Amino acid sequence: MAGTTRGTVVRRPLGACCLDDHGTFFRVWAPRAQAVHVHLVGPGARLVALAPEGDGYFAGEVDGAGPGTRYRYRLDDGDEFPDPASAHQPDGVHGPSAVIDERFAWSDAAWRGHAREDLVIYELHVGTFTRDGTFDAIHPHLPALRELGVTAIELMPVAQFPGARNWGYDGVYPFAVQHSYGGPDGLKRLVDTAHAVGLSVLLDVVYNHLGPEGNHLAHFGPYFTDRYQTPWGQALDFDGPRSGPIRHFFVENARRYFERYEKAKRAAKDIPALRREAEQEIGYVEQLATDLALAESWPEIEAVREALQEAGYWRGAKKAGPRGGRPGIRRFTTEDGFVILVGRNAAHNHALVTERSAGEDLWLHARGVPGSHVIVKHDGRPIPDDVIERAAQLAAYYSAARGDAAVEVDVTARRYVRPVKRGKPGMVTYRNERTLRVRPALPIEADRP
């Protein structure tokens, strides 16, 4: 198993991933549930338990669930809801989700899209562009648009919304294409035909809110926040302390549109690198926000300001604060002489991995959230379990999860920890870890400077 110090290590896509004609892999983020079952409805209905993966994710492979299988998720022993990452809602927002067959006979292998400066965009509402209001009904009109000089059609939101006709701005299933328009296969046919006549296809997506009717995401996890307000629906929480999986949900949504509907082939080759770069930037900002929240003195706050300036996020002039030396890495010594080092900020975290530790030392970090790197120095003696647990409590305490009742902390030998190549300070990858679940605490006092 491998990991990083921010976000969740994702092995499979969210939703239902059809493996063949008779099996499907299901994956859902449901941190508010203790147990999740996938309920296959219709003929041969049955309940199948999904296994917890950690960080609130549940997943499992289900035999006998091929394309067209209808399903819902049962949370604990209570209510059942459609899949938040459903690819198809054939009966609307209140019906079960459906497994789709990703296979499609694309005919646009030579298509490479348009450069941005060559785009002449025609915004198109699927429901009103033709009398039928479907993707298929658009096909006969595409040559006329191309002759007019249009080079791209931009579809107004097609994510599944209540009813059959709608502007699309109160969609509730971002991964599912509106069933009354023709569903996922209808969108694929439209994209393929548009490419054949020389038209690019753009999508208008809504990522700041979801509509109210049929919106069940809050039953699965803390997707929403009241820190922001929109006139259209609950605001999504993209910048809270535990919002990594929420951002991942929408990043994966965008990625899935590129993969599933062959959008922007020429640009798609750049998406993985751009995505990694964006995730690293987000992770570093999250780390600096955590450093600021946990700062205990003005010099620690000033260190965050300097890090923001060095990274180009802060353009203001440097302000002088109260005099005082820059605080060093926190040091704790147990009763039996083991030394535990805890970083105060991203720069400290980087130094702990690259300068202040050896391969045989132990490295700890709160799983999936920003926080301090922790090192337990190996002095030739086996490190006792109680020392490791204390170090894990410190890692949990000096993290964004300090207020949680219990926090998962990853532990591995420092030799298995590597700084991210060209990454921001303190960002690492690691492997061969084990995970402890501890209560955030200060089990011992820090050494005096």
Image: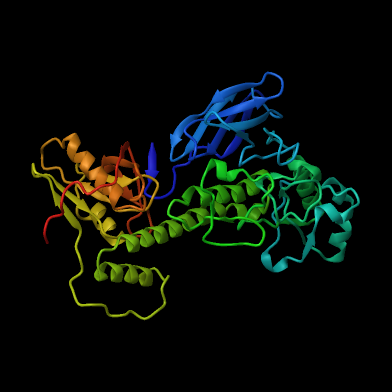
Observer-nearest residue: 346 or 327?
A: 327
Query: In the orientation shown, which residue stands out farthest toward the left?
Result: 336
Q: Is residue 269 visible?
A: yes
At x 79%, y 48%, the residue is: 190
The picture quadrant where one finds residue 46 is top right
At x 67%, y 50%, the residue is: 212
Residue 381: image location, x then y, percent: 11, 37
Horizontal side of residue 365 vs 107, given as left or right: left
Q: Is residue 414 visible?
A: no
Residue 63: image location, x then y, percent: 60, 22
At x 73%, y 48%, the residue is: 161
Quarter of the figure that contains the C terminus: bottom left
Residue 129: image location, x then y, percent: 86, 56
Query: Up-down: is 122 above or below 438?
Result: below
Judging from the image, the colouring scheme is: rainbow
Residue 319: image location, x then y, percent: 31, 80
At x 20%, y 65%, the residue is: 327
Quarter of the figure that contains the N terminus: top left
Query: In the orientation shown, which residue stands out farthest toward the front?
Result: 78
